[in-house]
Image (tube, coloured by chain):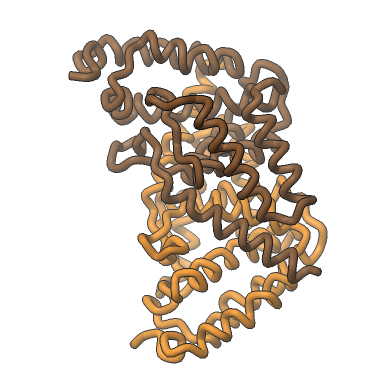
Chain colours: A brown, B orange
């Protein structure tokens, strides 16, 4: 019994290893290379640990951390869909549902079921925990851009207005003080030469 | 007030980003490249989530996850000390204490203090949570070796007896069923041509 469970748990953990090879649009803060989704997931779990006090409504930090640890696993099959990229949201959602079936299905059902439900809760972005988790997921790439000289903003030819719509709306919903802190720094970058014409 | 706290929290999170550039002895499961300590920390947090039922004594899984998320941060200043490598444990411990002073000291004291204490608890390996966390930290590199054809065992010319002493003792202390599961697979690898003479 324990052997069977261990085999399934290791199958899941070995599949999870592949998230280390899924590259995101954003770079490390020093711009040296693109970040992968596994190290990103670690980083935002740490963000949640450090910044939970700024959530709009009180959150269960440990639930948020669990949510963030698993939030990108579906990318192993479905790939990363950069927020400033060009993809069909319906097709991407279908790919992610199939990925969730397969990946959480590797675990014993009493474990895979609750993790799948936690991922669905994150995706739905309705609970206080999920709203905060989603906001944190958007903050870290902003900070990466502020530190790296706007690397992915330049690559994707992003405008200040797009940041406001795609990032600001979500971050201010879940962590308003964090957005208030960031928006002046973002505006300052978009007022630089690189920021005035990011696609140049 | 909130601004000051946010500045300190971002300072900490931006320093933490550097853990993505600390390379470990072990590779990804597919052997494509060496793993870094940030993605390793993510992976073992997921290990804790999937394998807490195998702990010797009941653990608080969420505390274990927090512990594992921060357990390697000191490597940003002190570097990784591979378990099969050649380093002076006293010098390494002194470097890690200085690193902990600096890194946890970036956060507001009401946050940095408890995280520092959690890291000390991990290092001391006396509490049930820390004993389990330490065992999990040893399991993941074993699995990486089993999947990658013994990559870091070959690089470090490791023997089956050294695995028993350096890994088996710790894993069987914190997660005996996991060690019982792994030891046959490890013995099988060391019975292959590569395993009989890993330094060849």
Q: Residue at x 45, y 37 (%)?
A: A80
Counting labels gives 0
Q: Residue at x 57, y 80 (%)?
A: B186
* Front residue of A16 and B13: A16
Q: Quadrant of residue A69?
A: top right
User: In x, y percent, where is residue B147?
Assistant: 50, 69
Q: To which quarter of the image does residue B184 belong?
A: bottom right
Instruction: Decide: is B146 above or below A71.
Output: below
Of B49 and B13, the residue lying toward us: B49
Image quadrant where one finds the C terminus of chain B = bottom left
Rendered-image quadrant of the N terminus of chain B: top right
Q: Is residue A78 visible?
A: yes
Q: Position of residue B177 (x, y in %)?
A: 74, 72
Report whether A126 appears left or right of A17: right
Q: Is residue B71 above or below residue B55?
A: above
- Quadrant housing residue A126: top right
Residue visible at 73% across and 31% down in the picture: A60
Q: Residue at x 60, y 67 (%)?
A: B139
Is residue B102 visible to the viewer in this orientation of the structure?
Answer: no
Please indicate whether residue B116 sits to the left or right of residue B156 in the image: right
The answer to whether A127 is drawn above or below residue A69 in the figure is: above
Between A191 and B72, the one nearer to me in the picture: A191
Q: Position of residue B60 (x, y in %)?
A: 77, 50
Image position of A27 (left or right of A94): left
Closer to the camera, A117 or A194?
A117
**Relative image position of residue B5 (x, y in whole percent):** 54, 23
């Amino acid at each position: 019994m324990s052997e069977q469970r261990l085999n399934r748990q290791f199958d899941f953990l070995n599949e999870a290893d592949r998230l280390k090879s899924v590259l995101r649009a954003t770079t490390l803060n020093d711009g040296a290379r693109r970040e992968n989704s596994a190290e990103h997931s670690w980083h935002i779990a740490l963000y949640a640990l450090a910044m939970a006090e700024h959530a709009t409504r009180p959150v269960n930090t440990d639930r948020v951390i669990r949510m963030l640890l698993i939030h990108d696993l579906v990318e192993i099959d479905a790939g990363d869909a950069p927020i400033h990229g060009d993809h069909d949201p319906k097709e991407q959602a279908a790919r992610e549902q199939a990925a969730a079936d397969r990946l959480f299905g590797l675990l014993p059902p009493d474990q895979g079921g609750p993790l799948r439900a936690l991922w669905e809760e994150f995706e739905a972005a309705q609970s206080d925990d999920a709203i905060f988790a989603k906001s944190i997921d958007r903050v870290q790439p902003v900070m990466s851009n502020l530190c790296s000289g706007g690397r992915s903003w330049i690559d994707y030819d992003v405008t200040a207005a797009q940041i406001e719509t795609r990032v600001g709306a979500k971050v201010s919903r879940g962590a308003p003080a964090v957005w208030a802190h960031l928006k002046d720094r973002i505006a300052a970058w978009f007022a630089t030469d690189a920021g005035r014409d990011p696609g140049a």
